[in-house]
Amino acid sequence: MAEYIWLIPFFPALGFLINGLFGAWMSKRAIAWIACLAVLMSFLASFGVFLEFLDLPAEARIYEINLYNWIAAGELSVPIGFRIDALSLVMSLTVSGVAFLIHVYSIGYMEHDPGFRRFFVELNLFVFMMLTLVTGSNMLLMFVGWEGVGLSSYLLIGFWYEKDSASNAGKKAFIVNRIGDFGFLLGIFLLFLSLGAHGVWTLNFGEIQQHAHLLNGSLVGIITFLFFVGAMGKSAQIPLYVWLPDAMEGPTPVSSLIHAATMVTAGVYMIARLNFLYSMSPETMMIVAVIGVLTAFFAATIGFAQYDIKKVLAYSTISQLGYMFVAVGVGAYAAGIFHLMTHAFFKGLLFLGAGSVMHAMSGELDLRKMGGLRKKIPITYWTFLIACLAIAGIPGFSGFFSKDEILWKAFSSVNGHLLIWGLGALTAGMTAFYMFRLFFGIFHGECRASEEVKKHIHESPHVMTVPLMILAFLAVVGGYVGIPHVLGGSNLFEHFLAPVLGGAHQSAAASSPGFGLLSSAWASSAEASHETSLEIMLMVLSVIIALIGIAIAYILYIRNTGLPGKFTAAFPGLFKVVHNKYYVDEFYDFVFVRGLLRLGDLLLKVVDIGIIEGIVNGLGSLNQWAGSQLRKIETGIVQQYALGIIIGAIVVVGYIVFSPVF
């Protein structure tokens, strides 16, 4: 089975080609069947390899296959090759499984859209590129998938290109990602040349890991930081996060696909894939962890004051991605991938649930015009509740296990720090608050919709609700593969990833100065002992913080609904700043967009017109002036010409006679 791993990305590519080339002559039903079956076959191929791998010993669970030599130029040789190991299998199963459910959901959601065929063509292309990214055996093939999901996201975000807001959002996502991708590409170049200086010309992941010891620490720090710049753009971290909220302009299934299990998790996957390099650079890991926790906290604060339900979920995605970067930043790579997987379940469910709400509310997105939908759309209600409990980290739901694992590693590892844990735990409480603010605002209280909208409120069709129920099931049970030792489990998920990520956390912790200069004695004790009682205490504390967040949301939006209005009236300036997302977009527009335009205008006037055209036009004017002066000696009088010849002859003869050379 492992010899056919190339089928995992092949099936979505085949669906893309069939619907793209022949879809114009096919019915919507046929297009949907082909698109969905393509992704389902990809999932089944991944699952078949997974079952086969379970029968192998842990050390044998790495397999590569090269189809043909893609690039051969000098010392560079890059094959079209695929790598299957525990990490790529987890990503393939997660991406293809969640993507299949989103494809099925899209049949009902996009049923009446005139761009139905184009939507599924682009959706299949997106899945193909993402699977290429996670199964490619070398950096260059990963980069093809990396750029491919960027292109696909541009097409899908701007799907309704007739709207300026949608087309602008697509361009914004594409441009911001190009900024990060430039750093990623520089990292590839530097890594290739640095290994080449030691006679190792390769971009293969296995060979890079085998020869990583040839690189010195400072060089690895530069390389890994450049890769992280790419991750900032692709995974929406400070300062390159601004594209993701605007990506809500795309259809809701697109938001679910991009923000749940695919494109935005590419940066986390990349760092986990290159864990052997990042573990050699504690300084870069520190940067990753700090940027991650600051992004998590910052995005959570913005989620407090948003009324667009998809924007709330978008900032929630940015925040949860920050958690994942905290995990990989402190060396807990398996915990980061664990949260990536559980996040795919509950965040995919949240976005599809939001789409179901929009379907019931005639496309309405404003939270202030909702309420009281609990009994009218019960399936959406219960599945949305499960997703909110999971993302809040309530025990028994998948998010609890992965979130707690990250917080514990952030506290206990040498790369961790008490402040990172504290900010992460506070963010967990904030997440619980704004998610239940969203939940109570949609489903509880009085319905604030117009009478016309109220008449048409209804539950979504089965083709939309069945994926919701499957994702709700996964949002509950998905975390049980990673039950920690402290709760009586063996963390099967971490053991499964051990052949790829095993030992990375320990080596990073052993070699890293981490944040030791600021660590408290309590944190140092936790790093040394990892006492069970301390882990349980921190787990209980994080749950209490989450429950406090839910309780505050209940008080403000169920028991005393007038309090939020009083708060915003008391602090109008603060609310305005947060509601307008701290004016970061406006700042970027003023400094970078308008600044570059002003710089371009300056270069046009000074360099182009003033210098370049000045020199060209000056030379032309000089030639014209010289010609006009020379014209004066062309009088047409023979006597003057004869006189000139005589004078010239005298000068030549005089030079010959009196010159010492002669």
Image (spheres, helix red, strand yellow):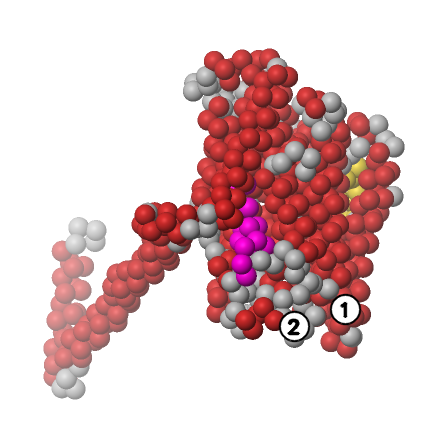
Q: Amino acid at mark 1?
A: Ile
Helix, strand or loop under label 2 = loop
x and y percentages locating residue 454 in the rendered image: 58, 68
Which one is earlier in the sequence, the residue at label 1 or at label 2?
A: 1
**Mark 1 — residue?**
31
For this rendering, which residue is in front, 316 or 617? 316
Q: What is the quadrant of residue 620 in the picture?
A: bottom left
Q: Is residue 12 left or right of residue 644?
A: right
User: What crowding class fits label 1: few (fewer than 14 Cα within 10 Å), some (14-19), or many (20 or more)?
Assistant: many
Q: Amino acid at mark 2?
A: Asp
Residue shown at the point (48%, 56%) measured from the top left: 307
User: Which numbered disc, 1 or 2, marks the residue closer to the eye?
Assistant: 2
**Mark 2 — residue?**
113
* Position of 172 relative to 620 (above/below): above
Q: Is residue 636 left or right of residue 58?
A: left
Marks 2 and 1: in contact by CB < 8 Å? no
Say if residue 205 shows up in the picture.
Answer: no
Extent of the magenta region: 431-447
Q: How far is the residue under mark 1 from the one under mark 2?
A: 13 Å
Q: Is residue 371 left or right of residue 204?
A: left
For this rendering, which residue is in front, 465 or 661? 465
x and y percentages locating residue 381 in the rendered image: 65, 53
Q: Quadrant of the N terminus?
A: top right
Residue shown at the point (67%, 41%) measured from the top left: 342
